[in-house]
Amino acid sequence: MDIDLAASRLAALGNSTRLRLYRLLVRAGETGLSMGQIQEKLGIPGSTLSHHCRALVQVDLIQQERAGTSLICRTNYSVMRGLIDDLAAECCADACVTSN
């Protein structure tokens, strides 16, 4: 994964409200949650929620879809897994190997 893209995604999650929002959507699964449901669960004003959703949409961590009059938010699981896998792939990459 491009290091700048990974940094942008991690930066978006670096805000406590956005991290709470993202965790809520991860827990909700593939069906996602409406903006109203999210607002109720997080207890934040609609304008604040829109601001934080926009930041996560811009880095493709979440996706939004209109369903009638509702706006549904869902985790983009493939992007989430890619970010996690990219970080895990670097684990111990430069560790010294000693042989006995």
Image (spheres, rainbow, N blue to C red):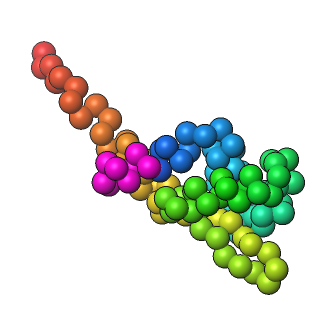
Q: Residue at (31%, 48%) from the top-left corner? A: 3
Bounds of the magenta span?
A: 1-8
Q: Residue at (30%, 54%) from the top-left corner? A: 2
Which residue is the extreme one toward the top? Answer: 100
- Give yes or no for residue 4 being in the magenta stretch: yes
Residue 46: quadrant of the picture? bottom right
Q: Main secondary structure of the magenta part?
A: helix
Across and down, in percent, residue 76 comes to 55, 63
- Quarter of the image for the N terminus: give it: bottom left
- Give yes or no for residue 12 being in the magenta stretch: no
Can residue 72 be seen at all in this image of the molecule?
yes
Across and down, in percent, residue 80 comes to 50, 55
- Quarter of the image for the C terminus: give it: top left
In this picture, residue 8 sits left or right of residue 94:
right
In this picture, residue 11 sits left or right of residue 91:
right
Which residue is the extreme one toward the bottom? Answer: 68
Q: Residue at (64%, 47%) from the top-left corner? A: 18
Can residue 77 be seen at all in this image of the molecule?
no
Number of labelled discs?
Answer: 0
Q: Residue at (55%, 39%) from the top-left corner? A: 14
Residue 30: quadrant of the picture? bottom right
